[in-house]
Amino acid sequence: MEDLELSSKYEISRVAEYILEHNFKRVALQFPDELLKDSTGVVSLLRKELLSNDVKDIGLYVMADTTYGSCCVDEVGASHINADCVIHYGHTCLSATSKLPAFFVFGKASINASNCAKHLCNYALSSTKPVVVLFGLEYGHAIQDVIEASMIEKSLSGLKFESELLFANVMSQFMIPSTSFETNGSGTDDGDCGDTPRRAYRIGGLCWSLEEGRNMEDYSLFWIGPDNSAFANCVLTFNGCEIVRYDATENVLLTDTSQQRRILKRRYFLVEKAKDAGIVGILVGTLGVAGYLSMIHQIKEMVTKAGKKAYTLVMGRPNPSKLANFAECDVFIYISCAQTALWDSKDFLAPVITPFEAILAFNRGSEWTGKYVMEFQDLVAPTPIGIENGQEARYSFFLGGYIEDHDLQDINKEDEDGALALANMTQTALQKHGNGLKDMVKGTAKSGAEFFASRSFQGLDINSNSNAPERFIIGRTGKASGYDRETSEH
């Protein structure tokens, strides 16, 4: 790629201007894997741009292999080099950061504006509702061209459609750290989006306003971009709207979104399955999105009060092998940004659900209404009702009968007397042996100690006749618990 093209795609001048304006000295450049090939060229051009302004003492550091999803700002990686800010390249969810300021370079994906406008006008002509136009952030640079092409297409073809066209706007290209627990995504608020004091909607870095008295169900959605996590977020959040997608790569309009809508049925299934969980793992899927600590505390409190045992786990990006190490967990709650929250957990030992689904599963007063919330910032985990007052047993669709949730007194016993209570609980767990691994995992096991006591692999075999460590000859072959022709020296 030539320097001129590279400079335009990665907005070298604007990035340099942002760095100089804020007097940053240590700058982290975050690239997703697919853009790493351009990282050296970007650094070279950016350094030349800074030198042209007589600035030589700015350190540029390339970051790759992000701690969690590449769509979020990797504040953990940036902290390793004490960065003053992060320049984020490529696809992003624009989730609010908690510590570092960030500048986002979305990229400039190619699009045939006239072809897109033609499909948009034809769809608006057939729609009985006003149309909201949403798009992937990589197409934000061409939206004004699509708007102008739509006006030309309408006038030249003589199309007469009553429905209006409402185009979303990109919220901002830079971000200031936020420590408040505010909405920044799929929720709604009563603030402004632009200069019009109307009800504002926000999702995935886009914002738009609707006329007073109107809801999103009164509109159809026209999405410009690929079938990715941002589109899935849109489909689930606005599942009450008719949605079509324009594929800018193939220049075709796709009206069948049944595949995405089937996700809702799967998510409802997981909610019902989670209700029968006894041990819950809370997976930390972000260490940078604003408000994640508050949500972890809220979810943990809600799960505990619902009569479940909760463990908080930090492991980076989850996969079936990692989660299989925690087989005692019946369900995992993944707390992350909206675009990495959904996991197809068919290959996992236990299902992985979102905080919104956890609220539906563990709060007796919650019911599935069809509304779906992806951003955890839009949620406030309610206090479960009825369990403390001895509410009647709950019906389980999977067990085919009424069951009672674990007793709170036993679940929270370890919190009453601290370490002593925990030791007694562990000793009791070790004395209780069920009918095998399956019973311990899906049956009455209430702690990790009770589950691990039933595992066949116990680690190294240690001589229980003496507390002193044994000395073994080194250099043998075989298993660590007993090498071939191994002898001990006393």
Image (tube, rainbow, N blue to C red):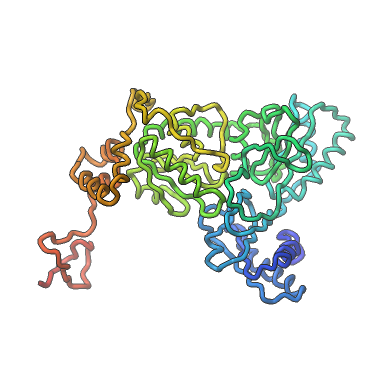
Vertical side of 388 occupied by 475: above or below = below
User: Position of 136 compared to 313: left or right?
Assistant: right
Vertical side of 477 occupied by 140: above or below = above
Give the quarter of the image for residue 197.
Answer: top right
Work out whether residue 159 can be spotted. Answer: yes
Vertical side of 358 occupied by 397: above or below = above
Please count the marks in the image. 0
Vertical side of 183 occupied by 42: above or below = below
User: Position of 352 compared to 403: left or right?
Assistant: right
| Towards the viewer: 47 or 365 | 365
Q: In which quadrant will I find the C terminus?
A: bottom left
| Towards the viewer: 474 or 400 | 400
Name the residue: 79% across, 31% down: 164
Q: In which quadrant will I find the N terminus?
A: bottom right
Where residue 224 sits: x, y (%)? 70, 41
Work out whether residue 2 can be spotted. Answer: no
User: Position of 226 compared to 465: left or right?
Assistant: right
Name the residue: 22% across, 40% down: 436
| Towards the viewer: 32 or 81 | 81
Give the quarter of the image for residue 477.
Answer: bottom left
Name the residue: 33% across, 26% down: 403
Where residue 127 sits: x, y (%)? 74, 26
Where residue 345 sits: x, y (%)? 45, 41
Give the quarter of the image for residue 215.
Answer: top right
Where residue 397 sits: x, y (%)? 39, 25
